[in-house]
Amino acid sequence: MADLTDSNILNLTISGFLSVQGKISSAPIGISGYKDNGGGDNTSTGPINWNGIWSNRGMQVSNSTSRFTVPESGYYVISQKNIGNNNSQLSVVFVDINGSNSNSIRSYARGQSHSYPMTHSFAIFDLTVGDYIEFRKDSGNLYLAGNKDYTQFAIYKIG
Amino acid sequence: MANLKNSTIESVNISGNLEVLGTISQSSPSLISADYSSNTSYTATGPISHNNSYVESGFNVENSRSRFTVLEEGLYYICWHNISNSGANTTRTRIYVNGSNRSQARGDASGTYSMVTAIHLEYLQPGDYIEMVHTNGTIYMTSQYNDFSIQRIL
């Protein structure tokens, strides 16, 4: 039997299954961020320009901080949450893949007087290297206030 | 090429790609998920202790099951949802990392049972710790309404 103890291998393909008794460490891919905007409403529509990044491992960030391009093909979890304002407007946020929401997700909230509805959307997408993700506010206004903890997103590769 | 059929290996570093055509199993992944159950008018503030674990692997669980300390460096995804009590004041629960606020689940004070979510993704080091913290209002704290999960991303 080959002795691979403490071996360094460039590439490895296993045709059967792999069972690991210890830990698996790797170079994970993912990014998370928030938008606070220093207070007040965000009434503009279009891709949300995030003004803070918690962590970024391997994702390409462009168009200020609104577009996230995947560095590898694979399955990605995309998750976002936001809070609408206390008025009668809808607050709708789409997740666009390559500029389109035709096969994607959105969150929806209708604010009322003295009501700040919080919404959340998430899904797993099969993406190809070079695909890009944007969170697009379609209508309404988000209640951003001075907090980093209301309007946030996370993207990570799972396989 | 080396024949590795049914091999047992102590440790291997792969600088390039690992492709597994079958499944990958790991005996001790870093993940935990649980729910909370105490009473329907939970007002105590501070880190919340969970009752029932669905899975619990690869974390040091401390302080009466409210603090989850990371044992392995890596990228962690944290998700928490809860429901506020009807008619309560604005209910705020938060994900904390190392004692600092990261994400808020805000239940509105509009006389409804608001189910809300907090999410967070962060690269953490061994010794970093995660808590679910109640800071305002009243949680409708019965099982299945209030859950969290933490997973290390591979």
Image: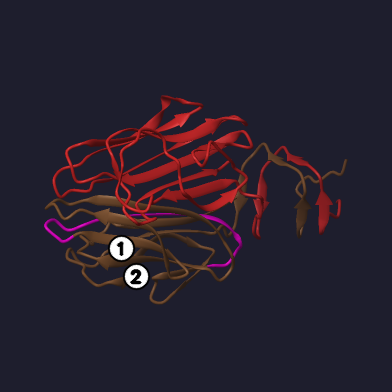
Judge from the rendering whether residue B12 lies leftward or rightward of residue A111; answer left or right. Answer: right
| Residue at the farthest top position | A102
- Taking the image as shown, residue B43 lies to the left or right of residue B153, namely left
Q: Chain of mark 2?
A: B
Label 1 amino acid?
Answer: Tyr
Report whether A76 appears left or right of A121.
right
Residue A142, placed above or below residue B93: above
| Position above or below: A52 against B134 | above
Q: Is residue B19 above or below residue B88?
A: above
The mark total stands at: 2
Do the numbered discs 1 and 2 sit on residues whose CB atoms are within 8 Å? yes
Q: Nearer the viewer, residue A120 or A14?
A: A120
The structure residue drawn at horizontal position 59% and vertical position 36%, both measured from the top left corner, is A70
Label 1 and label 2: CA atoms lie apart by 7 Å
Q: Position of residue B109 (x, y in %)?
A: 16, 55
Q: Which residues are magenta?
A: B70-89
Q: Is residue A24 magenta?
A: no
For disc 1, the marked residue is: B36
Q: Is residue B142 visible?
A: no
**Three-letter residue code for mark 2:** Ser
Q: Where does the image place residue B12, in percent across and percent down from the top left? A: 77, 55
Q: Earlier in the sequence, mark 1 or mark 2?
A: 1
Q: Which mark is residue A84?
A: none
- Residue for point 13% across, 46% down: A113
The residue to which callout 2 is attached is B49
Determine the residue located farthest toward the bottom in the rendered image.
B63
Chain represented in red: A
